[in-house]
Image (spheres, coloured by chain):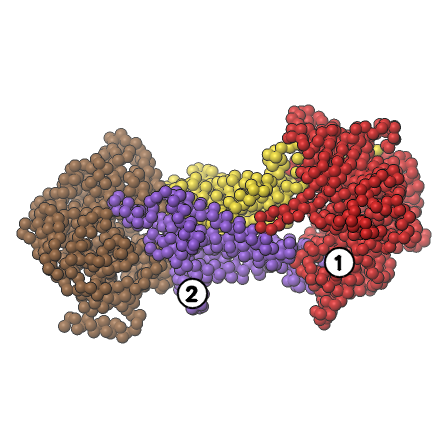
Amino acid sequence: MYGYLIRRLLQFAVVLLLGSIAVWGFTFALPGDPATVLLGPDASEAELAATRDRLGLSGSIVEQYVSWIGHAVAGDLGSSYYSGRPVVSELLDRIPATVQLAGFAMALTLLIAVPVGIAVALWPHSVVGRALQGYLTAGLAVPAFWLGLLLIIVLAVQLRWLPASSDFVPLWRDPGGALTATILPASAIAVHTSSVTARFLATSLGEVMGKDYIRTARAKGVPEREVIRRHALRNASLPTVTIVGLQLGGFLGGTVVIEAVFNYPGLGRLLYTAIGERDYSLVQGGVLFVVAAFLLLNLLVDVFYAVLDPRIRLT
Amino acid sequence: MTTAPNTPAPTPRRRLASLRRFARSRSAVAGAAGLLVLAALALFAPLIAPFDPAAQDGEPLLGPSGAHLLGTDQLGRDILSRLIHGARASLIAAAGAAAVGAGIGVPLGLLAGYLGRWVDAVAMRLVDLLLAVPGILLALVIIVVLGPGRLNLILAIGIGAVPEFARLTRVATLGIRDRDFVLAARGMGASTPDTMVRTVLPNVLAPIVIQVVVTASMAVVVEAGLTFLGLGTPPPAPSWGGMLQDARSYLYQSPSYGLFPGLCLAATVLCLDRIGRGLQLAVSGSGPNVATRVTTGGAV
Amino acid sequence: MVVEFTTSAGVVRAVDGMSYDVFGGETLSVVGETGSGKSVSVLAALGLLRTPNLRRVSGKAMLGDVDLLTLHEPDLRRRLGRDVAMIFQDAISALNPVQRVGHQIAEALRVHDRTLSAAAARTRVVELLDMVGVPHPGTRYDQYPHQFSGGMCQRVMIAMAIANRPKVLIADEPTTALDVSVQAQILDLLRVARQETGAGVVLITHDLGVVAETADRVSVTYGGRIVEAGDVTQIFTRPRHPYTAALLGALPRLDTASDRLLPIPGQPPDPSELPPGCAFAPRCPISRGRAVCTELRPEPVPDGSGTGASACHFPDEAASLLTARPDGEQAEPAGTQEGASEPEDAGAPDAPGEPPAAPVLDIREAMARFPVRSGLLARPSAWVHAVDGVSLRVPAGRTLGLVGESGCGKTTLARLVLRLVEPTGGQIMVDGDDVGKAGRSQLRRIRRRAQMVFQDPYASLNPRLSVGDNVAEPLRLQGVPHGRRRRQVADLFTRVGLRPEHADRLPAQFSGGQRQRVAIARALASRPGLLILDEPVSALDVSVQAQVLNLLADLQRASAMAYLFVSHDLAVIRQVADEVAVMYLGRIVESGSVRRVYDDPRHPYTRALLASVPVPDPVGRAGRRRVPLGGDVPSPVDPPSGCRFRTRCPIAAAVCAEQEPPLRLIAGGHTACHFAEETPDLASAEPAAGQGPEVRG
Amino acid sequence: GAPLLSACGSDSGESGGGTAGKITLGTTKIMQFDPYLTNTDIHIHSFYTYLIDYPSDGTYKPNPAGAEKWEFASDHKSVTITLREAKYHSGAPVTAGDVVTGVKRAQDPDAGFTLAQPTSFIDSATAVDDRTVRLNFKQPTPEPLVLDWMFAFPLVTAAGNTPAKLEHEPAGSGPFRLAEFQRNQRLVLKKNPDFYDAGKPFLDEVEYRFFTDEDALVAALESGSVDGAAYIAFRHADRLRDRFSLVEGNGRMSLFFMNALIPPFDNKLLRQALARAIDRERILKQVNFGIGDPVYTAFMPSSPAFDPAYLGSHGFDLDAAAALLEQSGGARKAVAGVTSGTPSVSTLEIIQADLKKIGFELEIAPQEEAAYLEALFASKLQCTVAAQPNNMQSPSLVARGRQMLTTKANTTFGDKVPPAYVEAVDAAASAITPEEQKTAYAALNTILVEEAWAIGITTMPSLFALDKRITGLVTDVRDYVNLTETKG
Ligand SMILES: Nc1ncnc2c1ncn2[C@@H]1O[C@H](COP(=O)(O)OP(=O)(O)OP(=O)(O)O)[C@@H](O)[C@H]1O
Ligand SMILES: Nc1ncnc2c1ncn2[C@@H]1O[C@H](COP(=O)(O)OP(=O)(O)OP(=O)(O)O)[C@@H](O)[C@H]1O
Ligand SMILES: [Mg+2]
Ligand SMILES: [Mg+2]
């Protein structure tokens, strides 16, 4: 187990290193120049050159990379070209908002997916089961951003129940406010992800229900409810945990369009803007952070998986 | 001396069994039919569409009427014609992205799974990396680097689909790498590439085919999302995502404008989804979990 | 009882009017080939059949005076596990992988007695584990199924089943997946459990040996029906149904090797298209086209004694089949097709005469180790000693049988020959060419001369290629042009008794026996001088197994191929082999001619194995001393010092731990035991079990 | 009496509840704090006082602001400016030295590009005393040009007047101070109690919120999350008109640029042909939703050089365009670059559709802004639709944009800038008398039409939708938002 963990951590480092190189390669391949964006359409060549110098954009790529990675290892990802603030603090600013949205979205996802998945797996042919299957298909078919728009128009603009733009209200400061501010983007995301998760859970549960040990439990005389609760669900949740982990990882920086639609100050929007503005240091730091967070999260998921599954834990 | 009398097997033709199993799922057939209709629309768009999709002849933002069955858009173009032509963008994105994803991912997964060792290690780290960057960001960066345009769009979405294909193929390859018939092929003197292509590949195709469908439906949504961000299909070529983007601004003036592209998008995904489920049933009876695009492909 | 399923091919009547009963304290064996409806009937009776395509279950399943089929689910569940308990075939998968073993047993107690405290349940479970012979039950309680061996899992299942002292204990093939030694342990344990609980036991099996060893009464199933029922001795000595008789005839025997087995021709019936008359009629030697057999379905008719019944129109003719056994050729039913593999026969199979020429296969000190990777960089930290210094020779035209328990390295050794596993040491010569040193093209040539047939006919054919293409694969690889390939494939098909017209079908459309023929045809395609057969018949039913074994014998006679025949079934090896090698933990412990090894075994392991095999003859079973080998095979990662068998050896002494016994020439064969000279005398003095866990009553 | 009154007003405003004096505005624009560098305009006026103000009605009557008074030399070769006694946010007094430093920076094209071209007429600046500055011109210069310059010249502390400092920290004396700034999220301004115009501004606090997506901004406005939305698209105007008060700022102009450096637009006739295929009416209707006015050359209707006659004589006429196209013999295919997601895309789509009718195939290649700008500056685009700032009452300021520079840095002509154009701009910059001016402006129009590389399409007023309780939000002729008089 420990050996496994350490090996995973090593892999993690390798991927990060690869990632940092790739991110650098990409940002330098980006057409457009931060100086032009910074100075706007009417700046002169000389001004641009001066700005490039100021931003540390002169010097060879390799030189820049080496100095950057050196700092990055020490936790210094450089400064944003625009705000002049350290990239780390720019990211730290957005992380609570991102985590909060991801948390809400995931909570909603599970809240929907678990009962729906179970119902679909156990009573696929009932009226409820069919209706829910319809929901699952629709959830996959409707793009989240489109759903978000509809939610805004109906709930925020027409009915004025909820705010259309979702400011970040920290949960610990104002739980009610946080809920109203986050619920719409979280729902728009969760309808889609819950469909995926519920389907996955339903399939695994369906598979598990056909396993020999379920038959054993029934043969022991365990009532059906308990068979499902104690034997089937735990086993069926195993593959689902991986999916949930991947989804959660995807929420970190991956909800660009939703954040744009709801004007939510998350990492995705930050990175999207940064790419548009050619804020290289922010893009590099940000993408690297997203990659690291994703990998770390999946590492945690794997550990959690191992906790759930003795076959992995004990070998 | 005895010989088993060969009991006649039920089907004379090969591969019919799974086709029939697919055909028995009514919803899968409906999905396939729907997709065929869409494909026909896309293919024969110029013949079917009542108007030139770029012609700005009508009054802008008309509701549905006799002349323009689904109304007109903000520039007075016929929405129905644009929808029909828009099927091209969506379907090309879908097919192209799936082809790119499979074209890169499957060989990668096959090599990683079959050869193992360092090939596997390197391939999987690459896949990890690709997987760790949210698909939409990846697509964004790729499009920004390569510039907008249909081909680049396809590449951008397709590359995002590579890890899924690679992982799926690798797992399937690992699953059969040590199976007797693969050993048998080696035992008969087949070379490694020969074994990989002729023996392993056909036997890992089933989940890949399903993933192709899954990827296609994901691509439809991501194409819409990217067009929505202004990086998708360039005008005046209509695309459903672009129409959605335009329409949202005119929702109040012309509510039906946004409805139709949204419905088309949903219907396409629905058809693909049905086909995927049908295929899954056909391939495996009830079937193991297919790695669906589990990250936030649709929840961008 | 009738059970029907809806399938694509129509309604499948898997159980078609089956009835049997069992009384307290007795063992009823339900025996029959795969697919004859054994499992489905009990599962349906207990309401455990849950597939969505279940169409109808009718009839009665009386437990005492309650009909289980009429009970509502909660009521039924209250009885399950308390009054009726089941033991399943694949014990490892029948246990929940993420729950502690102890908890799973405790659950069986606590669902029926909600007042039972956790602590009390634990105490009781530890008792039960101890009773079924699980060592260190206290520690084992908290372990998970994957930490148990198959045999241990089956013990756990039994503990679970007897926890509530049920009235009826149903065991569905409880030993099928297990080694003979473990099978013997489990059968013993079942016997103990029956005594312990006084339950009536229904033992479902396809192994006539097991039936003969354990049953009081027997029901024989065929095509979803009971074709014969009766007292165990009567069934084995005076069968009143031709199917029963044919089954007995097809069985290879440990005690005597017959020249030919008597296979039952054809395939078991497809339950979706049962014939109107007797389901067995198409394969029946006494039906012979009699109209009544094909038109009228025979109902079970009780025999005179009142204990037995037979569903045959001519019950009295059946027994004659059994007596016809010694001169089997005559009993061969007419009307079966003759394949091209018609034996030119004349020469007796093990005619001596020719002195053993240069061996086709010569294995010297072969060694194969697999790394156990762990730690930071996945460096191999230990090695699985799968094959650890094995020497064997197989001359042309002869068969070497290789036997041993699961995991002893048989498959690895077989694969070494084709270098499908990289050897760690030693030398393997095929026709004088060193396999280990061969370059790429030479290896390809060697692989052409030595071909392999795998155990699982369902896994060894490429499912995406038609059977014809499968067979043509080796030819394609040799660059044989397309047209010639087709002709050769057709030829090969006839040689193994398949219709060339079927070459276009996919493997999935063939039965196991047919597939194994395809696999053999493929192996023959490159005209090899050596066939490596890795458990070629273990996945097949007795009747089909006999067909394949006969085919192999015919082919050998015709082409003088050498066989390396790997099996865990001692009876099969006895039937096919000229020479036998017994393997234990990567080493050969005994080898020699069949007669020497079977009739005069000198190694305690061989002796124990032979003693573990159930003999399909109930007569005198009380007098037979079954001496199951205790415990499980030690891990090949860290084999015991000295003699590897010493940890389970009843006669182990100090020297065994210190010195590894070499293979010595003893009594015309080779044996690796320090006490090889004395074993025959020691036999009578050996204790009931080795140092492994004892079965306590 | 007036100061007393406004003091009362401000008092009552404060006692009326803390939030009464606060508004929240949403915008999609990126913010820049350096007034010498910025192109964006919603907040900068709040930080700085300029030398003079123009009234918000679009006319050019100079009002004293940072400058109390100014006096032109009779030879039109200098001006003497007396500064008002005022304090910067830092507490330091406004001095003549600050202006001298500021002029020096503005003269350096590397350090102050938005002011560099407009400042080019100044030869030197000298501090006469603490509050008096004298500017000497290179040549006799028309008053409107000087006034336009004064209007655009911010008072910045000498010490803080470097790009590095101003980028993050405004150093002005304007009506509001910077309270909080989170890039791309929010900017909070607090009232400057020391503002020279006592009692103003009326608002205590202004908060800007940043939106990446314009529709999200409008949705936020409609759901009440923000009190006002700035720079929203025209299509929202109709719908929002009832519930909100709409303010149209002076805005900019949209122009169709053709790059004379690369084929096919190195062909003058071809350029002239395309210039006639721009259907301003339809663009106004369908892209602008009726907001704005058609323009032909790069002058707004408020400019003295605006000549509506060209709209008639050179306006939309596909037949004329077709004839010219025929005559030009040039290629019939071109690619237009454009920033994706802007109304320029729709404008191009209309042009595209019309051109198609006369057999010219225009391909539209939307790009993301950074890539677009780079291509534009590198002179790689064949043609494009882009916005041009208002050149106020000095038509010579037409030469501010890179596509229209009179120097080699011109991205549409390179070193082949038509000499007639250079001459015309110079003449416009030195025409003192009204008659000279008239001739010069006419000449400027003629050469612009003749060379036809920059074709005016429409004005693009900036559109604000505000909660009805907000009043007094105005934009000046440069389109800078002025919140000094705003109440909420
Ligand atoms: N769900 C099902 N749908 C259709 N047919 C089924 C189903 N389950 C079982 N059968 C069929 O019922 C028949 C009886 O199956 P059963 O499992 O009882 O056989 P068995 O005698 O236990 O064989 P084995 O020795 O292989 O365990 C088989 O032919 C099988 O194919
Ligand atoms: N590729 C491998 N890597 C690691 N260990 C292996 C590998 N292949 C086989 N082994 C181990 O080597 C030992 C011998 O395996 P092998 O398959 O040869 O046994 P076998 O006698 O054929 O058993 P069975 O009767 O179950 O087929 C087993 O302990 C097995 O776990
Ligand atoms: Mg069974
Ligand atoms: Mg084996």
Q: Residue at x 66, y 35 (%)?
A: B186
Q: Nearer the viewer, residue C433 or C218?
A: C433
Q: Quadrant of the N terminus of chain D?
A: bottom left
Residue depicted at x 67% and y 32%: C437
| Image height of C253 relative to D156, above or below | above
- The answer as to whether the residues below labels 1 and 2 share one chain is no
Q: Which chain is yellow?
A: B
Q: Is residue C92 above or below residue A171?
A: above
Q: Residue furthest right?
A: C304
Residue beneath label 2, please?
A170
The answer to whether residue A295 is left or right of residue D397 is: right
Asked if one can make out residue D435 in the rendered structure from this viewpoint, the answer is yes
Q: Residue at the spot x=85%, y=27% of the render?
A: C354
Secondary structure type for disc 2:
loop
> What colour denotes chain D?
brown
Residue appearing at x 83%, y 42% in the figure: C671
- Disc 1: CA contacts within 10 A as few (<14), some (14-19) or many (>=20): many
Report the chain holding disc 2: A
Q: Which chain is purple?
A: A
| Residue C473 placement (x, y as % from top left) | 67, 31
Label annotation for residue C655 = none
Q: Amino acid at mark 2?
A: Pro
Tell me the quadrant of the picture where the C terminus of chain D can be found: bottom left
- Which one is nearer the viewer's eye here, C193 or D27? C193
Q: Colour of chain C?
A: red
Q: How many marks?
A: 2
What numbered label is drawn on residue C157?
Answer: 1
Look at the picture and state if D356 lies above or below D153.
above
Residue type for callout 1? Met
| Residue C107, quarter of picture | bottom right
Q: Position of residue C233 (x, y in %)?
A: 91, 51
Q: Is residue D431 left or right of residue A87?
A: left
